[in-house]
Amino acid sequence: MNALTLIQAAGPLLWILAALSLYVVYLAVLRAQLLTRLGRDPSATLARTHAVLLERGPHAALAELDRTGEATPAVNVLRAGLTRADRGVGAAQAAMNDAVLAEDARLYAGLTALGTVAQIAPLLGLLGTVFGMVRSFLVFSQTTAPTPTQLATGISEALVNTAGGLIVAILAYVARNALRARADRIAVSAERVREVFPAWLSAPVPQVPHIDFAAVPTEVAR
């Protein structure tokens, strides 16, 4: 019995598992592309914005941040804090907390679906296994001495569905863990921005030293 015959004998549940596998691959690729975009190193932008904040204040820092056009989670959290910085540290912290929640939802979107597939795929495979075994026992009820060919259909349905369910579950589980690890690394940078931003606002803005020009002697040109 070749592979094509086994697939044809596996029944409709195998096609459901095949559709789930395509969904897992599509979602994993889509999320990996998004996380690659969001995972760009924001250190240079954060350092430049911090310098502008110390020199010219929150409004200039916000303008500098908007000029870069970056939309990584760390930058978005910093942008939320700068937007409310004129209302005090408490208001800025509250805005950044909301921004962190929004960024977490964006980072971890789709991971629940992958986890659900990883859980239900083995159950669908087990259901296919039960159907296959039921088909094999029906052969016994209809024939007193069934041949191996008659039994092979039910047994192949059971085994192929079991293997298909396990393959889809493993694929979904590995993709979910890999994407979660990458999302965790990106989320840490946003959390660090939220933690250090109050200290940025509390830092004194350097003042240009005042010079009393009346007290400075001037040379008389000869």
Image: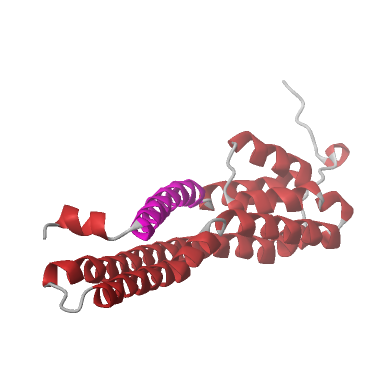
Taking 95 as reference, is 5 left or right?
A: left
Q: Residue furthest top?
A: 222
Quadrant that contains the N terminus: bottom left
Quadrant that contains the C terminus: top right
On the image, the x and y values in percent for residue 173 come to 40, 68
In terms of depth relative to the viewer, which is nearer, 117 or 33? 117
Taking 43 as reference, is 88 left or right?
A: right
Residue at the (57%, 48%) spot, across then down = 72
In terms of depth relative to the viewer, which is nearer, 83 or 125? 125
In terms of depth relative to the viewer, which is nearer, 14 or 203? 14
Report the span colored magenta.
12-41
Residue 30 magenta-highlighted: yes
Residue at the (38%, 67%) spot, across then down = 169
Colour mode of the rendering: secondary structure
Taking 45 as reference, is 169 left or right?
A: left
On the image, the x and y values in percent for residue 42 come to 53, 51
On the image, the x and y values in percent for residue 85 come to 81, 52
